[in-house]
Image (cartoon, rainbow, N blue to C red):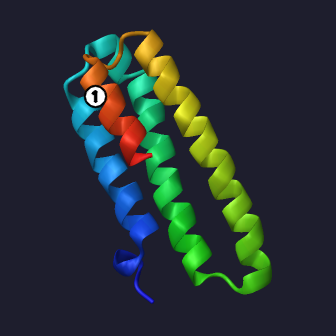
Amino acid sequence: MRNENLPIFKAALDLTVYLDSIVKNQERYHKYSIGLDLREYSKAMLFLINKANRSKNIERVNVLKLLVDKCEECKTLIVLAKELKALKSFKQFNIVQNLL
């Protein structure tokens, strides 16, 4: 099965693309600090989804556990970005929350 057909992959890809567009327009300080983390975590989620899709059943469970951890860490980063005012508006925060 190809990753593009997986709804979870599509959602993670949309999140990655949206976060990249947000980071691109951030101030220099946020772009190279929390913005970089947001981009890395969202890409890591894509890679873990891909790995889980290719894995056998026993290994898949471990990869999915890593994916859950990465998603929770990304959620925490998004809340931190909101508190640091790295997200320019509540609307951006709301969109990211809905994508996650």
The answer to whether 97 is drawn above or below residue 17 in the figure is above
The answer to whether 12 is drawn above or below residue 61 in the figure is above
Residue at 28% in and 15% down: 28
Check disc 1: other Cα within 10 Å, few if <14, some if 14-19, many if 20+: some
The one nearer the camera, 34 or 7, is: 7
What secondary structure is marked by label 1?
Answer: helix
Residue at 36% in and 37% down: 96
The N terminus lies in quadrant? bottom left
Image coords of residue 52 (percent x, y): 61, 73
The one nearer the camera, 94 or 25, is: 94
Residue at 26% in and 17% down: 89
Q: Is residue 32 left or right of residue 41?
A: left
Extreme residue in the bottom direction: 1
Image coords of residue 40 (percent x, y): 47, 42
Q: Is residue 27 left or right of residue 51?
A: left
Residue for badge 1:
92
